[in-house]
Amino acid sequence: MPFAIPPLLALACLALALSVTPAPAHETFDETLAQIDAALNTAPSDTELWRRRARLQRDRGDLASAKADLARACTLGLAPALAERERGLNARSEHRLDAAERHLQRARELAPRDVETLVAHAETLAELGRFRAAADSYARVIELTPHPGPEVFLARVRALAAGGGISEALRTLDEAQARLGPVPALAQEGVALELRAGRTDAALARLDLVSAPARRRESWRVQRAEILERSGRSEEAVLEYAAALAELSSTRRVTPAATTLAMRAREGIERLTRSPETSAQ
Amino acid sequence: MTGRLAGCVLAAWIGAASGMFWLVAPHASAEAIGDVLVSTGASWKFLDDGSSPSAAWRAPGFDDSGWSQGPAQLGYGDGDEATIVTCGPSAPTCTTGNFITSYFRKSFPVVDLASIPQLQLSLLRDDGAVVYLNGVEVARSNLPAGAIGAATLASTAVGGAAEASFFGFTVPAELLVAGANLLAVEIHQSAANSSDISFDASLRVIAETPLSLARSPYLQNVTSTSARLRWRTNVASSTRVRWGLAPGSLSNTVDVPGTRSEHEVALGGLPPETRIYYTVGSITQTLAGGDAAHAFATPPAIGARRPTRIWVIGDSGACATSALGCTDASAVRDGYLAFAGTQTANLWLLLGDNAYNNGTDAEYTAGFFDVYPTVMRSTPLWPVPGNHEFGVSDSPTQSGPYYDSFTLPTAGEAGGVPSGSEAYYSFDWSNIHFIALDSHDSDRSAPPSPTTNVCPAGLGGAMYQWLCADLAASDQDFIIAFWHHPPYTKGSHDSDNLIDSTGRMQEMRERFLPVMDAYGVDLVLSGHSHSYERSLLLHDHYGVSSSYNPVLHAIDAGDGDPGGDGAYLKSALGPSPDSGGVYSVVGSSSIISGGPLNHPVMRVNLNILGSLVIDVDGRQLDARFLGVTGNVLDHFQILKGPEWIDQDGDGIQDPADNCLLVSNFDQRDSDQDGYGNRCDADYNDDGGVGIDDFALLKVAFGARAGDPAWNAEVDWDGNGAIGVADYGRFRAAFGLPPGPSGLACAGSAPCP
């Protein structure tokens, strides 16, 4: 299964990518901390500043300080929903996933439209192996977000697939592509899922959907040829490899990538035209 | 007591004293500026039983006789209410199952419509609210866009000081009618177990605010046939754009139904390579345009080679936080304008940190839109976010002021492959492909071993996979990529420091540069460090600065300056001629912050305010870093294609060189056969160097210029005498064809 990524690994990567961590205004921890401390000197009761300070401490790995700052923010009247969310994120940083989930669930009940809470909750649920619930949480994010990016859809798709819901995952991909267009990562995810289910033609159809509008298609053709080759459809594969080579010959840009692609196509043709299987056809 | 209330009381008293119908008396008093039509603490009718009224509840004629009534503040759970509203079945504890929506109505009279120019609504709401005046929505706060139902939850839970805050809205007076008017409000909970709601409101007569621009017009998503014009007004208004091919002939009109303060108009069917003039405004008022300054040029069809100028600024948003930042950003802008003169840029790149310190809406207005109004009205702009955008914006959900301010291609509508995201996108302009990446907030994950495992199918994050597909699909002469975090810098940030910027510079270098190299991206622009740094022609360098090895990583270690070491040449020869790129940090467009500025790949390091201007003409790219007076502080050039190759290094490009592999800057060709003397021993022009040619050499041997036996064609070295050196050259060429010249010897033909 050359396109398959271990679902848990994929989810973990995506979760890391989707983690909503507001950017420090300045890029080094010390600079940002100094800036927050300066602001706290003039507004020592500002709960938002204490919350930001707590986040910063967590991001730098100092959980004890993060908890102390969060406690200070709570004492000063930090909104309960925010407090629960931050507690959940702290617990997640400590790998106390059950506790994190409980806090995030409470945060979610208090602020059911807060996207950051929903994403964090979904990620935690996925880490706990509760893929269905994670997928539902991502669905809520998609519902609440006017313009969700491909990453959010992918997270839901991967949670669904990890929970065995391949059909629903594919439906989600279709919905995503209907909204966002033929986005490569969505198409490739679909190709991988179809191949995982043994549906070569469906995988090829998903590939064709994304390659059709491309100005140059040779890289898609080579991938298509490789899928055909792996599924034993050698004659079609040779034709695809040859078509890719023909298209490559007209490129304006003779790049290392183009050279590598041409090599893959030539090697594919060589492999297949030498094989007894092709000879027999 | 307000003037209007005082007037009412006085009129009632006079009416009663004179025996007239006193109820008529108040209507004789016209409203005045400052009058309060609905006061805070007023008595409201309300529906608090969890039922949903018909849609008519928002309009004046609705029968609310069955509703409860009481003075504001209305609500529950905070202890500061004048009237307690029922929360739900768990009342009075209100801990669970609370009604999501409560409804409020307030009728009020208006006497003289002409005396009310505009209205100011003040609203206290916990958690969210929609306000209607005579059935028309006039304000929405902390509720999502789109249709609102009884079960719609408020966007966020309101707590702390916000529970007692009044929010202001300007309301058009045209919605009022003479006589009875109705203000209707629905308050929404953020959750069924939220313990409180609060509501109060006032409506006051205010002087009319003249319609004006809050953000001048700017150009987005410009293609050869389409464009988007955006601007912001101080108050809501209708939307109109008029456009045409001359300032005095704006024959096309585009209206957008409804009113708004954030205006966006899509123009379609534009002619390519044409200057488009325009106005923006409301249906009744032009706010800007109709002159030569409000115009832009559409690009040619994708791939067409036309002179194209690009202006690049980075970390330009300091004006949002400091007066010095404003001075410096303006100076950089003016330096560019002084340099450009009448040849202003066709397009404009923003490298991030466009508005310090957190990229809020107000900071964007002050740090960007207020600084560049004269540029953005005529130059389409294409931004990327920096780190400072993400104090309040978010990439996975594409929300916040950065995403609200810009309209960027997501579906390949400006060229390139659909990304599905405004965080990263691509577009084509003439023969250039541009790639914009989000180095801060989008998924930067890549396949395992990304420096050697480049673009395997289906691996890596969405941005990585999109980049691979996008580059594979481009066939443009030049590719320019831009993002905020530089892969190489030793300015105010250090790309070797893996903690700096939470490793983003390292990630961009290790994960994305191999893709740039594989696809021969020509120029990579970044900001972040507040300085100007510019590399040599580089490839395959993905480590920290100490791992840089010029033998392995420098394609051309020169300065790339046509007036110095000469241009960087990306020829059409070799197995992968489109290799290598130049990396430039342009982060000093409003602030300078120094640093060691000693990264070994950098050929130029300047701690100077400035911006970059790039000119592309055919397969020649010239980039110039400009100071605040428009002075050129760095110039490098990239030349691509066979027309720029000069294999013998004599300064004559191969297509024009009469000796391809033999240096002959003077191009001397005595017999004018197309082959320079330095590579032409075929004296009799019979196509080969043979015994007949030797005979001619013998005749001329020893002769000097002017002698009867003199033969200029035989004088190989051009010293005015036929001697041993000329004979030696003849021997070397014996038996071979003349040349090489042009491409005649570039193939398999034997060449001397």
Image (tube, coloured by chain):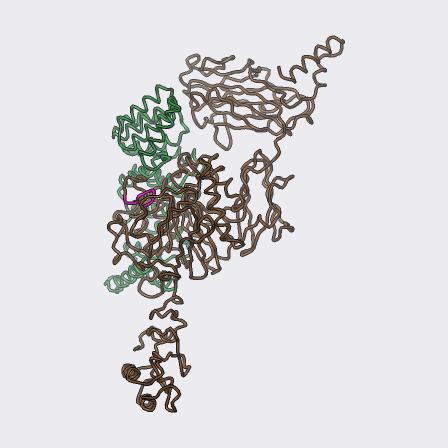
Chain colours: A green, B brown
Is B281 located above or below residue B568 in the figure?
A: above
B25 and B686: which is toward the camera: B686
Residue occupying the point 46% across, 26% down: B154
State whether residue B642 is above or below residue B424: below
Q: In this image, B663 relative to B48: left or right?
A: left
Q: Is residue A100 magenta?
A: no
Residue B314 rendering spot, x and y as whole percentages:
42, 45
* Horizontal arrangement in the rendering, residue B329 relative to residue A75 (left or right): right
Q: Nearer the viewer, residue A164 or B176?
A: B176
Query: Residue B236, percent across and down?
Result: 58, 34
**Which one is in front, B451 or B653?**
B653
When the figure is inspected, residue B736 is found, relative to residue B103, above or below; the finding is: below
Prevailing secondary structure of the magenta residues: loop
Q: Quadrant of residue A255?
A: bottom left
Label total for image: 0
Q: Position of residue B90 (x, y in %)?
A: 42, 14
Decide if residue B193 is in sight here: yes
Quarter residue B576 falls in? bottom left
Task: Let me know if residue B491 is in the magenta part.
Answer: yes
Q: Position of residue B561 (x, y in %)?
A: 38, 59
The quarter of the rendered structure image containing the N terminus of chain B is top right
Q: Quadrant of residue A76?
A: top left
Query: In the displayed structure, does residue A241 sit left or right of residue B303?
Result: left
Quadrant placement of the C terminus of chain B: bottom left
What span is in magenta? B489-496
Q: Is residue B659 left or right of residue B71?
A: left
Q: Is residue A1 visible?
A: no
Nearer-the-camera pick, B683 or A136: B683
